[in-house]
Amino acid sequence: MPNHSEKPVTTSVVITETPFDKRCCCWFCGEPRDGDFIFPSPKPLSSYEENNYLRPSCPHPVLSIPSCSECQRIAKKAQVANIWAVNSYVKKQLLTHYSNDLAIGINWSQEELATSEFEQGNFAGFARSAWFMYEVAKGRVNYVGWPLVANGIELAVINYEDVLIDTFSFDGVSYPSLPDAIKHYAAIFFLDEAYLFSVFQYLGESAINEKAFAKAVRFCRLLVNATPHERKRAFEDLIARAE
């Protein structure tokens, strides 16, 4: 019978090395650091818990990563097996949080905002700060952290393909995955997600590229207020014209 009163097993934390020019940066988003994120949690476990695999399997030691307070809060909620998967989770959450700011770059150009004549009324503040907020949001979502070095050894990125193989870049923004990009554009333009995905698949002929995505968004925007039947007929006409 296991002895549950055994003394907990403590786990040492490895502080990762940070390049000199990044010493004040968050590894996740590049914003000013406000502390460190530790993964996996170094919470002490009893030897019984250790032996019975109650600690999630992780291929690297417990790491201390410089991070900002916002990314720390997000990262602590990630239920994943390695630090690179944590990073992917953080990016998805930042994309959702800053969706309105990222939409500015989709609906406006910097020149259009500068000449928008919004100097008066409620839009004055928007005209002054909108592009700045867009660039901040895009920078955080697009940011790529430096290689992680622990005890003088650069960590091999475990399961990197599983984490990043589906990343998709469009119009200057790097999305964690194609579904994230589709969800983002569907929300901005009030499009049906499933329909946008189907049109994109057809136009791209199974190839994931920006040209096909742009065509799919333009096509679907013509059908914003269409009924499901009208969207179906439009899709059938699109296919018929291509034959």
Image (tube, rainbow, N blue to C red):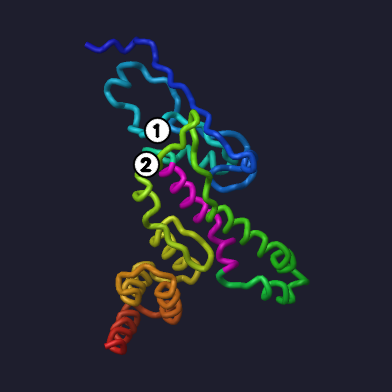
- Residue that label 1 marks: 60
Magenta residue check for 167? no
Which residue is at 48% across, 47% downward? Answer: 90
**Sequence order check, earlier mark of 1 and 2:** 1
Residue 142, position as x, y percentages in the image: 53, 55
Name the residue furthest front: 152
Given residues 221 and 224, the one toward you in this image is 221
Q: Amino acid at mark 2?
A: Ile
Disc 1 element: loop
Q: Is residue 181 left or right of residue 27?
A: left
- Residue that label 2 marks: 158
Q: Which residues are magenta?
A: 84-105
Q: Is residue 235 left or right of residue 71?
A: left
- Above or below, comparing residue 33 to residue 44 in the picture: below
Q: Residues within 10 Å of mark 1 (few under 14, many from 20)?
A: some
- The image's mark for residue 167 is none
Magenta residue check for 94? yes
* Secondary structure mostly taken by the magenta-highlighted segment of the chain: helix
Q: Amino acid at mark 1?
A: His
- Above or below, comparing residue 95 to residue 157 in the picture: below
Which residue is at 55% across, 43% downward? Answer: 27
Which residue is at 31% across, 89% downward? Answer: 241
Quadrant in which the C terminus appears: bottom left
Q: CA distance from mark 1 to mark 2?
A: 9 Å
Quadrant in which the N terminus appears: top left
Given residues 39 and 116, the one toward you in this image is 39
Residue 81, position as x, y percentages in the image: 37, 38
Query: How many marks overall?
Result: 2
